[in-house]
């Protein structure tokens, strides 16, 4: 029976819900990541324009919690920090967040089932946290391993209750291996990756991702018309993944930031402002430690 890698995907510029992923190189048990978006023009709902530069730092620690013949459970903790250089919205200059996640996966003869849950908090301030400020997310679904070009197919549904406002998203999993070199992995509509196994320790290719995040406005800037915020963006470009030493990998990527929107809400969760950025580019560096094929049951 093939071994499954479950990878919880959570990020400050992350996805709607934690879902399983399948990696050809192993499970990322430690990840440090830096993203840079250079200056771009942003417009608010009133048409006023300003320039903004943003940086994102992420760190993730992930480990198996329970492993048996049929069950696999992973736990993870992630820290994230989002910074902007602009003078119009001071509460966006520095936002930090933390999230914890658990994902359970049960192997079946034809279909394997998974369920995941996550709780997190993001803000520029860490005092006076209430239950209404927490970000709750989850997902569930089923995947099927196959022989042939299509190696994996699955369906799922993700849900997010950001400050009591529910969002539901259907998810499609697909993994295709055209030959020993070419492979397509996609989790629609959240991310896709088309990779070429160039050298024994080198992968290159194309990728895209749709990113979602929510945050609480700091008390210093909070008003009746400003309490919550959500960030939505979509990126696409190229990547290069290189094994540096044993379980240590470096991934460099870059490309276009197609859509970048910040929605702002009042205390009643009604939209009061929207910040829309034009097309821009990004660069990303990721250093990760991966559990390889011979370590545990996750590959």
Image: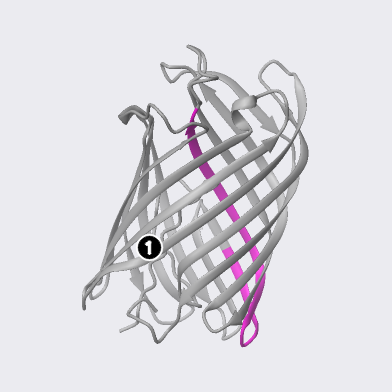
Q: What element carries label 1?
A: strand
Magenta residues, dominant SS class: strand
Q: Does the magenta stretch include residue 209?
A: yes
Q: In which quarter of the image is residue 285?
A: bottom right
Q: Nearer the viewer, residue 14 or 149?
A: 14
Query: Which residue is painted at 21% across and 74% down in the image?
Result: 70
For label 1, the crowd category at 10 Å Cα-Cα, with few meaning under 14, some 14 to 19 and many 20 or more, is: some
Q: Which of 186 and 216 is in front in this view?
A: 216
Residue 234 against residue 253 in the figure, above or below: above
Residue 187 position, x and y percent, is: 48, 58
Dot 1 corresponds to which residue? Answer: 154
Magenta residue span: 193-216
In the image, 184 versus 240, the foreground residue is 240
Please tell me whether residue 134 is drawn above or below residue 182 in the rendered image. Answer: above
Left or right? Give the position of 188 relative to 132: right
Relative vertical location of residue 246 with respect to residue 276 in this rendering, above or below: below
Residue in view at x 54 percent, y 56 percent: 191
Quarter of the picture holding the N terminus: bottom left
Where residue 282 sits in the image (x, y, percent)? Answer: 72, 51
Identified at 50% across, 78% down, the residue is 25
Q: Find residue 238 and report its horizontal and vertical position in percent.
A: 70, 63
Quadrant showing the C terminus: bottom left
Please state which of residues 215 and 277 is positioned toward the viewer in this rendering: 215
């Amino acid at each position: 029976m093939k071994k499954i890698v479950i990878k919880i995907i959570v990020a400050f510029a992350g996805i709607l819900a934690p879902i399983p992923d399948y990696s050809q190189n192993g499970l990322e048990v430690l990840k440090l990541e830096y993203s840079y978006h250079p200056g771009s023009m942003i417009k608010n709902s009133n048409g006023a324009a300003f320039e903004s530069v943003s940086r994102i730092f992420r760190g993730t620690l992930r480990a198996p919690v329970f492993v048996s013949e049929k069950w696999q459970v992973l736990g993870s903790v992630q820290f994230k920090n989002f910074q902007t250089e602009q003078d119009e919205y001071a509460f966006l200059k520095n936002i930090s967040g933390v999230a914890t996640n658990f994902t359970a996966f049960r192997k079946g003869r034809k279909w394997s089932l998974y369920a995941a849950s996550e709780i997190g908090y993001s803000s520029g301030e860490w005092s006076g946290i209430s239950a209404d400020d927490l970000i709750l997310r989850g997902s569930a679904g089923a995947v099927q391993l196959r022989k042939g070009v299509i190696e994996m197919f699955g369906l799922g549904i993700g849900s997010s209750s950001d400050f009591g406002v529910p969002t539901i998203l259907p998810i499609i999993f697909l993994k295709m291996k055209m030959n020993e070199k070419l492979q397509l992995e996609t989790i629609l509509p959240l991310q896709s990756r088309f990779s070429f196994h160039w050298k024994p320790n080198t992968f290159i290719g194309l990728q895209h991702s749709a990113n979602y995040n929510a945050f609480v406005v700091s008390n210093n800037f909070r008003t009746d018309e400003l309490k919550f915020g959500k960030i939505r963006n979509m990126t696409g470009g190229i990547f290069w993944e290189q094994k540096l030493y044993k379980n240590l990998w470096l991934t460099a990527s870059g490309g276009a930031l197609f859509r970048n929107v910040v929605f702002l809400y009042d205390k009643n969760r009604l939209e009061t402002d929207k910040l829309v950025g034009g097309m821009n580019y990004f660069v990303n560096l990721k250093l990760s430690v991966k559990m390889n094929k011979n370590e545990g049951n996750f590959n």
